[in-house]
């Protein structure tokens, strides 16, 4: 009589989640990141200066300048170091769940925070603290989101799947713009000032909840489980953060510099462009011209990033990086020439072209960064490299652009600066080795 053979049932820790679910989980977190970022910037200009930072108080006015831009970037390197270390020690999945919860709680609390009229100076101080928490959480979000995808799949389509988290900036931007447009169209100015902006922040909790549910269904990556088992078999193991900084600093610096053109370009093409178009001393055009161009550009980026990623899986990471860097150096000057025509179609072409270059960079960053570091320190290395570029290139780009225009009175000073950022990325890309066929399990 035949005896049925019972197949062993895999435990949850042994199962592997499908790549589409992993990718959706990663995208949800980065989309929240950029939704919050652009929403905060918009609210700071429209609402926060009246609700939290009344002009009658110069001390609070100073806090406004600090809170609306710099504070989010200040905390990101610290978040990258702490959460990156935890991600290498405790696992990618659990760390990403923690970062998403921190992000969601801090954003939701902003929606509930009473204004200056109720709490006095405590209101803007609490707002700054909550922004610091957001920045800390975001410092470890992107690296973990990319690794969750990269370490679940093979090398054949790694760029494609690892590019999903980089759909977060254009998607988050579009979501933020869409929510603000709907609220502005359906509410009076007084209602929006009173409670409408709070609805926009509270809606972030829905995105966080979706991302959290998806991440709860995602298992730990197979590569991390294998590295964890290997570490447990060893008598000693160096702290991941310490090892990343002392033994892999060259990879961190190289990866960060490859992002200079992408990061500086993104903030010029999507944020500074609004200032340049609307400022009375610059083009002095309606804000709608710039906002429409940016929204079209972000829509184009959503389509282009996966397509560039498919190409990167076929021809490699370096050719895409090198091409995007050269394009940055050229488009920096074309961009401002098109803007200065004051023609809305030309302005849209300028922004779309810039964001397509950003898309090419974004398509390869996730895979390339992952392929530079061994599994035991990959979260730390990737997070540090990504946020180092954000601080050195992204955070100062709009501020430096405004300063350069003030010093030289010409947009081509900004174009020259952006071309230098592209040149830095070009040099770093040419120094990098091709990693397309790298087996992540063998990187040492």
Image: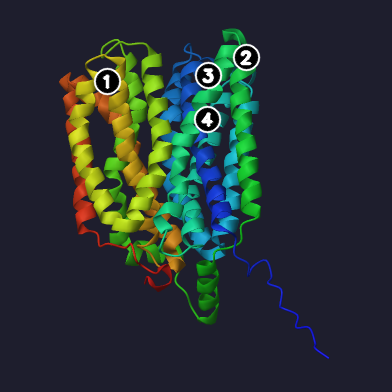
State the SS at label 2.
helix
Between tags 3 and 1, which lies in front?
1
Residue at 41 percent of width and 46 percent of height: 306
> Which picture quadrant has residue 211?
top right
Comes first in the chain, label 2 or label 4: 4
Residue 189 screen position, x and y as percent: 57, 9
Comes first in the chain, label 2 or label 3: 3
- What colouring method underlies this structural image? rainbow
Rendered-image quadrant of the N terminus: bottom right
Checking the image for residue 346, the label placed there is 1
Checking the image for residue 194, the label placed there is 2
Label 3 packing within 10 angstroms: few (<14), some (14-19), many (20+):
few
Residue 118 screen position, x and y as percent: 64, 18
Compute the Cα span from label 4 to label 3.
Answer: 10 Å
Q: Which residue is mark 3?
A: 181
The answer to whether any part of residue 310 appears in the image is yes
Q: Which residue is mark 4?
A: 175
Comes first in the chain, label 4 or label 3: 4
Judge from the rendering whether residue 383 lies leftward or rightward of residue 214; answer left or right: left
Residue that extends furthest to the bottom in the rendered view of this protein: 1
CB contact under 8 Å: marks 3 and 1: no
Compute the Cα span from label 4 to label 1.
Answer: 25 Å
Between tags 1 and 2, which lies in front?
1
Compute the Cα span from label 1 to label 2.
Answer: 38 Å
Judge from the rendering whether residue 194 lies leftward or rightward of residue 85; answer left or right: right
Between tags 4 and 1, which lies in front?
1
Position of 296 relative to 236 (above/below): above
The answer to whether any part of residue 52 appears in the image is no
């Amino acid at each position: 009589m035949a005896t049925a053979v019972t197949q062993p049932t895999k435990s949850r820790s042994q199962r592997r989640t499908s790549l589409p679910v992993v990718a959706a989980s990663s995208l949800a977190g980065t989309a929240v990141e950029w939704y919050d970022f652009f929403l905060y910037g918009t609210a700071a200009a429209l609402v926060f200066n009246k609700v939290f930072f009344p002009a009658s108080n110069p001390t609070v006015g100073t806090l406004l300048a600090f809170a609306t831009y710099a504070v989010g970037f200040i905390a990101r390197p610290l978040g990258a170091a702490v959460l990156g270390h935890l991600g290498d020690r405790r696992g990618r999945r659990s760390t990403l769940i923690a970062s998403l919860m921190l992000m969601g709680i801090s954003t939701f609390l902003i929606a509930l925070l009473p204004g200056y009229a109720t709490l006095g100076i405590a209101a803007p101080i609490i707002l700054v603290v909550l922004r610091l928490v957001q920045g800390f959480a975001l410092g470890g979000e992107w690296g973990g989101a990319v690794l969750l995808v990269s370490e679940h799949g093979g090398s054949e389509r790694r760029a494609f799947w690892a590019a999903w988290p980089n759909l977060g900036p254009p998607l988050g931007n579009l979501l933020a713009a869409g929510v603000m447009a709907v609220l502005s169209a359906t509410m009076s100015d007084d209602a929006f000032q009173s409670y409408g902006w709070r609805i926009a922040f509270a809606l972030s909790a829905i995105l966080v909840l979706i991302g959290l549910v998806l991440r709860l269904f995602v298992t730990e990556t197979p590569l991390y489980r294998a590295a964890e088992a290997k570490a447990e078999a060893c008598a000693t193991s160096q702290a991941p953060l310490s090892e990343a900084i002392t033994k892999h600093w060259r990879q961190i610096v190289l990866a960060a510099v490859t992002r200079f053109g992408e990061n500086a370009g993104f903030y010029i093409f999507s944020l500074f462009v609004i200032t340049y178009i609307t400022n009375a001393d610059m083009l002095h055009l309606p804000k709608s011209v710039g906002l429409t161009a940016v929204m079209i550009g972000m829509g184009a980026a959503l389509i282009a990033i996966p397509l560039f990623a498919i190409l990167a899986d076929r021809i490699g990471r370096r050719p895409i990086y090198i091409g995007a860097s050269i394009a940055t150096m050229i488009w920096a000057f074309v961009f401002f020439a098109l803007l200065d025509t004051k023609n809305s179609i030309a302005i849209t072409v300028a922004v779309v072209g810039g964001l397509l270059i950003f898309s090419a960079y974004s398509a390869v960053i996730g895979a390339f960064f992952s392929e530079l570091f061994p599994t035991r320190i990959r979260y730390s290395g990737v997070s540090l490299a990504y946020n180092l570029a954000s601080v050195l290139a992204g955070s100062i780009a709009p501020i430096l652009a405004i300063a350069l225009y003030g010093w030289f009175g010409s947009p081509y000073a900004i174009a020259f600066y952006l071309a230098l950022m592209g040149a830095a990325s070009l040099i770093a890309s040419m120094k990098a080795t091709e990693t397309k066929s790298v087996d992540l399990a063998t990187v040492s």
